[in-house]
Image: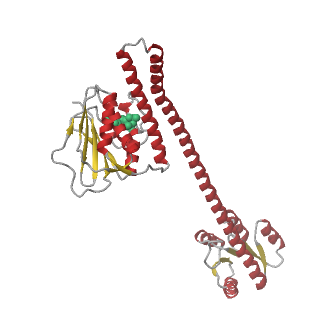
Amino acid sequence: MGSLTRDPLVLIVDDDLALLDALSETLVLRMAPISVDTCERASSALKKLAGKDYDAIISDIKMPGMDGLTLLGHVRETFPDIPTLLITGHGQLDLALQALRSGAFDLIQKPLDRDHLIAALSRAIETRRLRRELKESQEALRMHAAGLEQRVDERTADLKRALQAKDEFLALISHELRTPVSVIFGNIELLNKLGDKLAEDDKQAAMTDLRREGRRLRRLVENILALARVEYGVANQAAPVSLTRIVSQQVEWHHQMYPERPIDLQLVHEIAPVICDDFSAELVLGNLLANAEKYSPPAQPILVLVQADLESVVVSVRDRGPGVAPEDAERIFDPFYRSESSSGVKGMGIGLAVCKRLLEAYGGRVWLMPHEGGGSDFSFSLPMASVPQVPKVAKSSVTDMVQA
Ligand code: ADP
């Protein structure tokens, strides 16, 4: 461990130039590889210390101007990790004691014993290395702890968001389930208690309510299940599916549920099957039709168009409602996104997200086209199960008017 890869760097401070040179020479000779800087004044030593990261300092204790003890004081204060060895004269016991009390790493007595000097300096350099390593380890630990703390904070925030989303989802679901369930129960009670006495029209109205709300409830549950299945990567079994069959079926059912709504179905009968599964194709179409029903005035017609190109089949559902504001156009395919304008209309904001995910799982897509003169034009495409040799788009396409 330890990131220091350079040679040890030592600073010697002594006003005795001869001693300075001799010391420097000795260190280079006996401790190589080592780098040695020298200076004659304590004040210039402080300047050098500010510019380089020294491993140890050797300083004479008695010097003109700032003495070794004062230099030691500054070093202890500003560079507390750099060990300082002080050179004391013979018999300067008081100074020696003072130096030790002030935090000198070791004392070197004059006349200098070179072995003692080398041993003391080696210890100082090693101590400096260990202190540096300790600091690096502490810093690494601190960073690691900070990283862990940040991850805990992020996970906690994720968890809080997930819990909040779960609460909102449950609130939304119970709110959305309440209406169809109470309509269904109300009508069952009505038919049960007063069935014989009810006029035929009232009976039919109750039955229509039951069927509408029953279908709404089923689609709601299917959407929730589909979203969960896609979320967990569970795919339905892909099979060739005839979209003309599914579209005709769904349009017919829609017409039975909402007989007052004009639906114009335009399709080409010999369109090749697409890669999908019945459940997904029905749910996608059911969602688009339900939206066209919910978001457009009752008397306005809905147009359902099935077309094909060489490789895919495109189904479009057009209504003449208020349309989708440009700022909502992208986001309406996100789960739980509902535009402000739809706040008065029942819904959970998952129908289009389910369409997008189910279709993408089969290499298809869904999109919204701005429609001239208002209204919404939602289309989806699915790849053909086998690309036909001859284009199937007949020049004279058959138009089925379920009801104009
Ligand atoms: P929901 O209808 O339950 O809110 P959807 O995912 O089906 O959920 O639709 C998301 C949003 O897209 C709706 O809340 C509505 O704002 C908008 N939207 C969908 N279809 C239409 C449409 N035919 N006309 C206008 N807005 C629509």
Which of the colour schemes (rainbow, by chain, secondary structure, one colour) is used? Answer: secondary structure
Residue shown at the point (38%, 51%) measured from the top left: 239
Residue shown at the point (21%, 54%) measured from the top left: 391
Count of number-bearing discs: 0
What is the quadrant of residue 352 in the picture? top left
**Location of the N terminus (image quadrant):** bottom right
Q: Is residue 338 visible?
A: no
What is the quadrant of residue 83 in the picture? bottom right
Relative to residue 201, is residue 277 depicted above or below? below
Q: Is residue 399 left or right of residue 115?
A: left
Q: Nearer the viewer, residue 395 or 176?
A: 395
**Residue 135, how many percent across, how many down?**
66, 65
Where is ligand 1, by quadrant?
top left
Residue shown at the point (29%, 35%) measured from the top left: 323
Q: Is residue 91 left or right of residue 160?
A: right
**Of all residues shown, which one is farthest toward the front?**
196
**Residue 358, how many percent across, how many down?**
40, 47
**Of all residues shown, which one is farthest toward the bottom?**
29
Q: Nearer the viewer, residue 233 or 101?
A: 233
**Residue 20, how many percent across, how many down?**
68, 82
